[in-house]
Image (cartoon, helix red, strand yellow):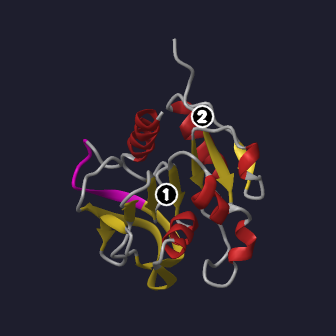
Amino acid sequence: MSRPVKVYVVDNGGQWTHRIWRVLREVGCDSKIIPNTTPVGEIDADALVLSGGAPRVVWESPKLGNCIDYFERFQGPILGECLGMQLMAIHFGGKAGPSEIPEYGLSRLRVIEEDDLFKGLPKEFSVWESHNDEVKEAPNFTVLALSENCRIQAVKHWHKPFYGVQFHPEVNNTEHGEEILRNFVRTVKVEQ
């Protein structure tokens, strides 16, 4: 029998970090929460989920510890949530900044590219948002989903198994959130 997939949650100070960890355990992962200052060499996970957090990505990125190093040196899939996605986009040549209309609460997500994350899901469903900043440009990514107030809600890197979502799949109010995380875990199994 094969061992469970190890997906660690990198804590960037997000209010739902523990909820990400719990949902990952519910879908069968071996998971734990690690500080964002954990050196890459000390991480024995198959994949990482970068949590959201309070820092503003444009001027408070030093508070995000080793996240940039994870993009460069971690050997496995990464899912960036909210702040994690914004940092990922900036690192790979994109732009992020203040939202014209910050989103809090439910928003209607429209999937425009199914890819791995949205496989088997409806083309539209409700997701939970909590952000002041958003990705403005993502030149090295395929945009997978958008909402009325945010034109880049989910992305997939062109060459790496890196994904990002602006919303919070771990929150109960997000429809199909568990399936999105389960789909991410499936990509980890493919990469193994």
Q: Kindly state the secondary structure of the residue where label 1 is placed.
A: loop
| Residue at the image position 36 percent from the left and 72 percent from the top | 152
- Please state the extent of the stretch shown in magenta in the rendering: 120-127
Instruction: From this view, report whether residue 98 is shown above or below residue 88.
Output: below
Judge by depth and name the residue closer to the eye, 43 or 102. 43
Q: Amino acid at mark 1?
A: His
Question: Which mark identifies residue 168?
Answer: 1
Tell whether position 54 is magenta: no
Left or right: 16 as drawn, with respect to 181: right
Position of residue 139 relative to residue 15, above or below, is below
Q: Secondary structure at mark 2?
A: loop
Numbered label attached to residue 6: 2
Residue 25 locus on image (x, y percent): 58, 33
Residue 166 percent across, percent down from the top left: 46, 65
Q: Residue furthest toward the top? A: 1
Dot 2 alpha-carbon crowd within 10 angstroms: few under 14, some 14 to 19, many 20 or more: many
Q: CA distance from mark 1 to mark 2?
A: 20 Å
Is residue 174 rendered to the left or right of residue 25? left
- Say which residue appears at 68% left-offset and 76% top-offset: 61
